[in-house]
Image (cartoon, helix red, strand yellow):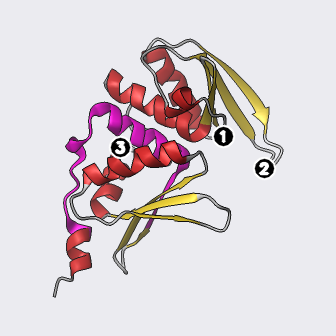
Amino acid sequence: MITKRDKLMLEDLNWDMLSRREQGYLLGIFLGDGNVFVNEKKGIYRVRFCLTKGEATIQKIIPLLQKLFRFHKIRVYNDRKNETLIEVHSKSLVQKLYEILNNNTLKTMEQDSETLCGLIEGLIDSDGYVKGRTAEIKSSNKQLVSQICSLLEKIGIKYKLTPTTSQLSNKIVWRFYFYLPYFISPLKASSGTLS
């Protein structure tokens, strides 16, 4: 017998309901602050976003997830560290992320400019900040760092890349500094918040 939960899990993802820029934004936020948990035996396919970046980002992600599904319940709650967690249980979303991403990097760089701009905006809102018209993105994932360089170059953004050592993990963290062009507008640029 198929339960109501099974029907929701099997419901098709409507990825095309999002604009290319929205798709890119969701991928950027996921690369910075997302994770997937799968337990095939129990039928669990969970996508989670762990956000500490403020209410504006949270209020942008929820409607994007609601556009993807008609009936999925999106769970939003705070954990013990006062991070906001947004969860959706969806096998089709997990499969879509696996189709596009590989170990928190893009499988292919063949994306249109709208998707790339959205991706950069999502990365800024998850792993970066804006001060004035200067933006920064941080990452310790060497392969993603290489891809971000290519993305910025592909859409014509000059950047400065600086390695630093994290005091917490003693790992190298790469920082991208660049002037925020008019066609990139992360939420942090409008709110003036720093992370």
Q: Find out whether the residues at labels 1 and 2 contact each other: C-beta distance under 8 Å.
A: yes
- Residue 42: in magenta span: no
The structure residue drawn at horizontal position 60% and vertical position 39%, both measured from the top left corner, is: 127
Q: Position of residue 34 (x, y in %)?
A: 50, 52
How many C-alpha atoms fall within 10 Å of the one at disc 3: few (<14), some, or many (≥20)? some
Per the model, the C-alpha gap separating discs 1 and 3 is: 20 Å
Q: Position of residue 155 (x, y in %)?
A: 43, 16
State which quadrant residue 108 falls in.
Answer: top left
Q: Position of residue 27 (x, y in %)?
A: 41, 42
Indicate the amino acid at tag 2: Ser
**Which contiguous range is marked in magenta?**
9-37
Per the model, the C-alpha gap separating discs 3 and 2 is: 28 Å
State which quadrant residue 136 falls in.
Answer: top right
In the picture, the disc for residue 169 is 2
Residue 2 vs 97, above or below: the answer is below
User: Can residue 102 be seen by looking at this rendering?
Assistant: no
How many C-alpha atoms fall within 10 Å of the one at disc 2: few (<14), some, or many (≥20)? few
Q: Nearer the viewer, residue 84 or 8?
A: 84
In the rendered structure, the answer to whether residue 25 lies left or right of residue 147 reads: left
Q: Position of residue 41 (x, y in %)?
A: 36, 80
Indicate the amino acid at tag 3: Ile
Give the labeled residue for mark 3.
100
Task: Say which quadrant the N terminus sits in.
Answer: bottom left
Looking at marks 1 and 2 on the same chain, the residue that comes earlier in the sequence is marked by: 1
Q: Secondary structure at mark 1?
A: loop
Give the labeled residue for mark 1.
140
In the rendered structure, the answer to whether residue 60 lies left or right of residue 92 reads: right
In the rendered structure, the answer to whether residue 186 lies left or right of residue 160 reads: left
Looking at marks 1 and 3 on the same chain, the residue that comes earlier in the sequence is marked by: 3
Q: Find out whether the residues at labels 1 and 3 contact each other: C-beta distance under 8 Å.
A: no
Indicate the amino acid at tag 1: Ser
